[in-house]
């Protein structure tokens, strides 16, 4: 597959992933559906402010089975590759059951959100942590930074302000800061990063900012279009920056 910086497709990644050659991806960094449907109580209506969005996205109601992805993820990942996938407490056991037997190592990371949705009724924990499963084999690409910076714990606010895509709003847009940290540790410049559930393309933006190439798939047209726009902007900005650097001798 030949492309310069990124290649994205709109459609079902169960089919699109089959178009990728064997051992062609250095890092799968993805954020598939969490199937949290059965646990949601819906939006919380409040008199003094706009409703707290607890709503379910349509795509999250479709059953996601980690075991259905083992064969294709293994096939396309290079032997030196890494897999990172965001998930939730209800699916972590299924990820472990399916992926622990087929990789040398199965670990997890925690992303701590410093500004989670408040708990209005004060009867339980805030949902301030998200889980990320990580898998690899011996000899995988690994850029160890320092003991202090290699905790399996990342702290960052959820997406806010100008980073948040406004049209359409994606309920689970991931912050580029978190994705860049994972990409930095687990791949090298020029490597190919794949996100088969790319939403509005946050993994792609992070990959381009880290000088990696990106392949992304997304089912829903509005999210796909937003990702396309973001990635084109990012790639234009990079081109502009390298032109300015060349001309000013930076
Ligand atoms: C948790 S969201 C990813 C959000 C993304 N990390 C971002 O920052 O925008 C999961 C995405 O997967 C998409 N999706 C679900 N099933 C899919 C499938 N079979 N093929 C492609 N995309 C799918 C959904 O439409 C949704 O946008």
Image (tube, grey):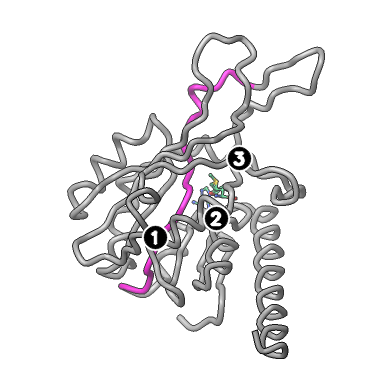
- Assign a secondary structure to mark 2: loop
How far apart, in angstroms, are the residues tagged by discs 2 and 1? 20 Å
Q: Is residue 82 above or below residue 148?
A: below
Q: Which type of secondary structure does the marked residue at label 3 adopt?
A: loop
Q: Earlier in the sequence, mark 1 or mark 3?
A: 3
Residues rendered magenta in the picture = 23-42
Judged from the image, the secondary structure of the residue bearing numbered disc 1 is helix
Q: Give the residue number, with chain letter if any, for mark 1.
A: 185
- Relative depth, front residue between 110 and 8: 110
Q: In which quadrant will I find the C terminus?
A: bottom right
Mark 2 = which residue? 198
At x 66% / y 82%, what residue is drawn? 242
Is residue 112 placed above or below 234 in the rendered structure?
A: above
Query: Label 3 near label 2: C-beta < 8 Å?
Result: no
- Using a 10 Å C-alpha cutoff, classify the residue at mark 2 as few (fewer than 14 neighbours), some (14 to 19) or many (20 or more): many
Residue under the image location 37 percent in, 62 percent down:
186
Decide: is 92 above or below 20: above
At which x and y percent is residue 98? 25, 45
Neighbor class of circle 3 (other Cα within 10 Å; few <14, some 14-19, many 20+) is many
Compute the Cα span from label 2 to label 3.
17 Å
Q: Is mark 2 within 8 Å of ligand 1?
A: yes
Which mark's residue is nearer the viewer, 2 or 1? 1
108, 39: nearer the viewer? 108
Q: Is residue 6 magenta?
A: no
Residue denoted by label 3: 158
Between 246 and 183, which is closer to the camera in this rendering?
246
Lateral position of residue 238 relative to residue 203, left or right: right
């Amino acid at each position: 597959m030949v492309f310069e910086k990124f290649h994205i497709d709109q459609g079902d990644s169960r089919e699109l992933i089959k178009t990728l050659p064997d051992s062609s991806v250095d890092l799968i960094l993805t954020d598939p559906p969490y199937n949290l449907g059965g646990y949601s109580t819906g939006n919380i209506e409040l008199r003094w402010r706009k409703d707290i969005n607890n709503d379910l996205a349509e795509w999250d109601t479709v059953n996601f089975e980690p075991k259905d992805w083992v064969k294709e993820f293994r096939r396309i990942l290079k032997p030196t590759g890494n897999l990172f996938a965001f998930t939730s407490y209800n699916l972590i056991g299924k990820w472990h059951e399916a992926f622990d037997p087929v990789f040398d190592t199965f670990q997890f990371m925690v992303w701590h959100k410093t500004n989670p949705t408040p708990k209005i009724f004060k009867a339980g924990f805030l949902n301030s942590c998200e889980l990320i499963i990580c898998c690899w084999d011996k000899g995988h690409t690994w850029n160890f930074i320092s003991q202090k910076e290699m905790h399996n714990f990342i702290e960052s606010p959820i997406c806010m302000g100008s980073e948040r895509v406004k049209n359409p709003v994606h309920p689970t847009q991931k912050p580029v800061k978190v994705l860049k940290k994972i990409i930095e540790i687990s791949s090298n410049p020029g490597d190919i990063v794949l996100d088969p559930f790319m939403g509005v393309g946050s993994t792609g933006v992070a990959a381009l900012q880290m000088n990696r190439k990106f392949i992304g798939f997304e089912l829903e047209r509005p999210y796909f279009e937003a990702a396309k726009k973001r990635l084109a902007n990012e790639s234009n900005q990079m081109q502009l920056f390298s032109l300015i650097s060349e001309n000013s001798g930076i």
